[in-house]
């Protein structure tokens, strides 16, 4: 079978967005009804406030963790900052789950955000492991800090996933507002 004979997984001109599990066809991030629910939900505003707050807490904590790893100083401040970062993470995960329920009718793993939610579970697991190590007095300070850094690395990837989806939603919205016009990605 030649390349020409093989079916293309996506028809030319088809926009590929969302997180569809069906090969070849994908759904838009939001249906018209989901877009309305998203735009009318207070939880959209809550997520919009918590996400940059979490990023700010992350930057402060990352600085303190790196300082502790490099100098051995400031372990208490680093631990406190990681606990605060984890509490903010839990808050954004709970409110994000409520947002998903309001918009998509599912608490987690809605099709449009399936892989972001999967990766969020890894972020939660690493942050929770850190708490278990801290409060269970398991491992060394360095091991705890390295688990925190792993959690922070996963968080950065996950934040990137959500920023990409935000961009896709904006492009999708612009395409819906101006039918027939091409929207550059």
Image (cartoon, helix red, strand yellow):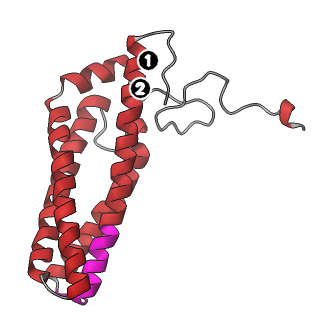
Please report the residue visible at 26 percent of the width from the left and 86 percent of the height from the top: 142
Contact (Cβ within 8 Å) of mark 2 with mark 1: yes
Please report the residue visible at 19 percent of the width from the left and 88 percent of the height from the top: 72
Closer-to-camera residue (28/78): 78
- Circle 2 Cα neighbour tier, 10 Å, few/some/many (<14 / 14–19 / ≥20): some
Q: Which residue is disc 1 drawn over? A: 175
Magenta span: helix, strand or loop, mainly? helix
Q: Which mark is residue 68?
A: none
Using the image, determine if residue 22 lies above or below residue 184.
below
Visible residue check, residue 94: no
Residue 139: percent from left, percent from top: 25, 89
Quarter location, residue 59: bottom left
* Element at label 1: helix
- Circle 1 Cα neighbour tier, 10 Å, few/some/many (<14 / 14–19 / ≥20): some
Visible residue check, residue 101: yes
Residue 127: percent from left, percent from top: 25, 67
Please report the residue visible at 33 percent of the width from the left and 55 percent of the height from the top: 120
Closer-to-camera residue (168/46): 168
Q: Which residue is disc 2 drawn over? A: 171
In magenta segment, residue 138:
yes
Residue 102: percent from left, percent from top: 23, 31
Query: Disc 2 versus disc 1: distance between alpha carbons?
Result: 6 Å
Pick the quarter of the image with the N terminus: top right
The magenta stretch is 137-151
In magenta segment, residue 133:
no
């Amino acid at each position: 079978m030649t390349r020409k004979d093989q079916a293309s997984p996506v028809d030319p001109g088809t926009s590929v967005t969302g997180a569809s599990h069906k090969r070849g066809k994908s759904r838009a991030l939001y249906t018209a009804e989901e877009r309305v629910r998203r735009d009318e939900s207070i939880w959209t505003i809550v997520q919009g406030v918590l996400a940059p707050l979490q990023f700010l807490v992350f930057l402060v904590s990352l600085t303190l963790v790196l300082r502790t790893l490099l100098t051995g100083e400031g372990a208490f401040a680093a631990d406190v900052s990681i606990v605060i970062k984890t509490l903010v993470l839990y808050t954004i995960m709970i409110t994000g789950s409520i947002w998903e329920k309001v918009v998509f009718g599912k608490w987690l793993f809605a099709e449009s955000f399936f892989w972001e939610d999967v990766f969020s579970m890894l972020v939660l697991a690493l942050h929770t492991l850190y708490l278990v190590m801290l409060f269970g007095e398991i491992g060394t300070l360095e091991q705890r800090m390295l688990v925190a850094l792993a959690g922070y690395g996963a968080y950065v990837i996950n934040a990137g996933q959500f920023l990409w989806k935000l961009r896709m939603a904006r492009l999708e919205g612009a395409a819906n507002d101006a039918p027939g016009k091409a929207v550059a990605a």
